[in-house]
Amino acid sequence: MSQTSFSTPLIGRDVELDRLSGVLERARGGEARAVLIAGDAGVGKTRVLDEVAGRAVDRGMIVLTGHCVDLGDVGLPYLPFTEVLGAVAGDERFADVRAAHPVVDRLLGGGTDAVGDRLRLFEGIAGLLGDLADVAPVLLVLEDLHWADQSSRDLLRFLLSRGILQRGASGAPSHRLAVLASYRADDLHRRHPLRPLLAELVRLPAVERLELRPMADAEVARLVRAVQERPLSDATVRRIVERAEGNAFYAEELVAATDAEPGGMPGGLADALLIRFEQLTDTAQQVLRTAAVAGRRVEHDLLLGAVGIPEEELESALREALGRQLLVPGDRDTYAFRHALAREAVYADLLPGERARLHGTFARLLAGRGRTAETAAERAHHHRASHDLAEALVASLEAADHAQGVGAPAEELRHLEAALDLWSSVDPSARPSGEGYDRVTLTLRASAAAAHAGEAHRAVALTRAALAGVGHDADTELAARVRYTLAGNLLGVDSLNAAFAYSSEALALIPAEPPSRTWVWAAATHVMAARTVGEDETALRVAREALRTAEKLQVTDARADLLISLATLEGGGRRTPQGRERLREARELARRSGNAPVEMRALFHLAAGCHESGDLEESLPWLAEGLDRARRAGLLSSPYPLEMRFLQLLVLYTLGRWDECVRAAAADAEMLPAAGAYTSGPALYVALARGDSAATEQARALLEGPFDWMSTLVAAITLTDAAALRGDAEEAVRRMRSTVSALTDDTGILPDVTVRLAALALSAVADRAAELRQSGDEAGVRGWADTATELVELARTTAARGRVGTPQGPEGMAWLARAEAEWARAVAGPDTAAWAKAVAAFDYGDDYERARCRLRHAEALLATGDREAAATEARAARETAARLGATPLLERLDTLVRRGRLAEASPDRSSPLTAREQDVLRLLALGRSNRQIGEELYITGKTASVHVSNILAKLSAASRTEAVAVAYREGLITREETVG
């Protein structure tokens, strides 16, 4: 009855654990149930069963565990049940129960298999388990049923179909018992003797099946970081996650091998994976070796040509491999290894010469089908592995062209980097020739693919490599291209001064006359770089000159790019109608030219302009159009689409469409590059506002790795707000100051987010000052008041100027109003006028922040004695908090309502409840639980809980019973309405 001790945490499996915990609860209530738990080897069956067993022990259940063992053809009969009964026999608590069933002792002593004896034995074991369940609820765990002997399978069939799960005469289940039995799904070949038993058992009403599927990638990543004491790089974690394919055991073994040769496999894991392979016939083993060289998946005809045996023998070997579940059939006459690591283990078992020969065979077979773009990547791989480097180079470049054509920048980058690795190893006479086929140009192309794939730092590294390859005698236009490309990539990683230096060099390398496309693009890049370092006059002058040249040369996409820059530079920028009109013109020009990156830049600025001017709803169509354009171009991971994803979630968050925001973030997480993690920021804001403590952990994770401007901003907002919510003024101020310092550019211009961060930190400062003022610590109050003044001055300065030199829009001014109100609260106490201004300022569309300000306004009004106005504000804030599911805010409002007796001050004495709350109240009076209320009203139990909380607060009741009593007394419900 002992449990296995695991050193690693159980990650994921929440749904499965909830379901099994439900089975335990039903068993404790007298409803016997059984669950057959299926899953591949290593997927985590034992770990889940251990967790459930632990929960059962905590709930006072008797836990009995039996293990089946692989003993080949000499299996011991009843082995798992012998283990279970041995545990019962060894526990003095159950001596009387055991004495009542002496027939069981024969099993412990060897027993017999005569039919009559078997029936008495089976009935005796069923009776023993039933009597134990009368002492305390029982959990019977049977592990590894795929190794169970025939006698154990027969006993299990009897117990589940006629014994412990059978219903009594009344039809009600008669035992407080749960049975959980696990087996390996990947071991069940077609003729496995457990198959017919499983098919029979799952038809029983008290038996259900639960499949443990592979873990999600995010869960495997968490597991990898949890089991490794020293930190692992993101690249290493990603590689382990990819190879493990959701299998916890494989992941842990791969973590243990991180110090070994890159891409290697621990010997123990390889041996485990090869056990089933070595049970195949020689022909089947050769077929699998050949298939392993082809890759994870192989076509039937290709395998036939490579293995070199008659088709009948191949089919027989494949049937054997499929039966052993080493291969699985796929679409269009293909076969795939069940798990990628199984393929790796078989591949690693090949001799080096055998491996190279088979790769050469596959390369020739693929080439015989024609040098198509679809087969280029496969040909490149096989040529390289067979040491034919010249053909590998040609095929890699073909594969890169194909990836570019179908909008797959990450794959294009991979093939281009492979080609660059091969370049120096291939004789110059064997390399491709013609325009674009030189090392510098290919490296520049690789840097563009990296930028489009969201690998900003990789793009910078590749462009620096291209610059290093530009000799003194290089063509000046190529030298300029390399420099302005490097400048653009440096802007993407926030190296602003370096970007300006390289764009200046690019512009100096080529003259403005005679006009050239290269000069126009160098100028366009220089405009953006100059703007970021505060050289606005230079940016304007160069932009206007370059626009005239672009018009003269009819370089349409460069015209569009320069119009975008001018729209952000001139007048009031992108927030104004004039700025947006120019951006619409730029979008149309970019669309006509077919330049997707420039078109997306225009769409981003259109959406951002709407957002900054407070036209939130108007920004959403531009964002949808921009993301659709990026999707069609295969550029969803490039910089502007990433910023559009973030802005889209931010708008949804601000508009209070929180569930939609969270769903969109979850969908994005599956396809975003590591550099795009910041885009989920608004979903973190939702999680924090709903009381999810995991939001802070996810925010801290954004700060890992190289510095990223947006990740730092998102993490700072979350962590500063989190510190303020828990009352940690020191941490809130420290986080605010360090972030502003990190995000302040080289010219000393503060980031726009300074206003928001200052307001959040000021909230914690004001709370601390209020506590000290109440305790009479005037010196402490003065200290925090000085800090508050410092923070509000930063907010005022930033809001007045803004990053682009003009006052901030409605959002920034709303945060400034909140900062001013918090400052007043810290320095002198609650200021009703300041909080009224803050409430009004957030009316541009941010319901949550408006509700938070209303809470403060209600507190200030209550301090002045205006309870009726305070009640009005609190009620409005509560409605918003309840609608959003902002539990922490709701709790604070409930506290305020109770302490201030604001429900009594409601001006509407007819009924303070909404129609839905009235429905919930009626069901409360009938004694319904939250879950039952949800079922009757077709809402979730969580939503019902929020309504109940609302009712308690509005009726100033401390409990559900008191709320019903108050409702009767005040005539909100009648006895006639609540007759069950």
Image (tube, grey):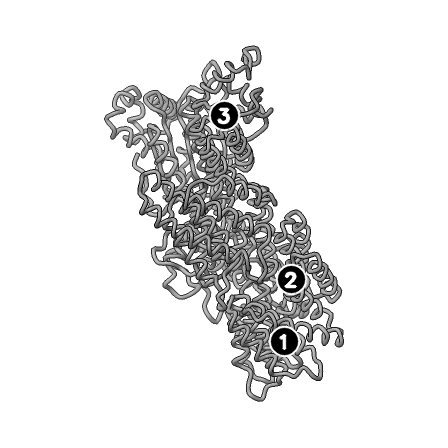
First along the sequence among labels 1 and 2: 1
Identify the amino acid type marked 3: Ala
Question: Up-down: is 209 above or below 787?
Answer: above
First along the sequence among labels 1 and 3: 1
Query: Which percent across, then down, holds residue 409?
Result: 60, 64
Identify the amino acid type marked 2: Arg
Query: Which percent across, then down, holds residue 586?
Result: 71, 63
For disc 3, the marked residue is: 903
Viewer-proximal residue, 695 or 510? 510
Q: State if disc 2 and disc 3 touch (CB < 8 Å).
A: no
Crowdedness near tag 2: few (<14), some (14–19) or many (≥20) residues, C-alpha within 10 Å: many
Query: Which percent across, then down, holds residue 749?
Result: 50, 64
Query: Which percent across, then down, holds residue 154?
Result: 43, 31
For disc 1, the marked residue is: 522
Crowdedness near tag 1: few (<14), some (14–19) or many (≥20) residues, C-alpha within 10 Å: many
Identify the amino acid type marked 1: Ala
Find residue 601 and name its label: 2
Gap in Å between the C-alphas at discs 3 and 2?
Answer: 51 Å
Specify whether residue 120 is in view.
no
Q: Secondary structure at mark 1?
A: helix
Q: Secondary structure at mark 3?
A: helix
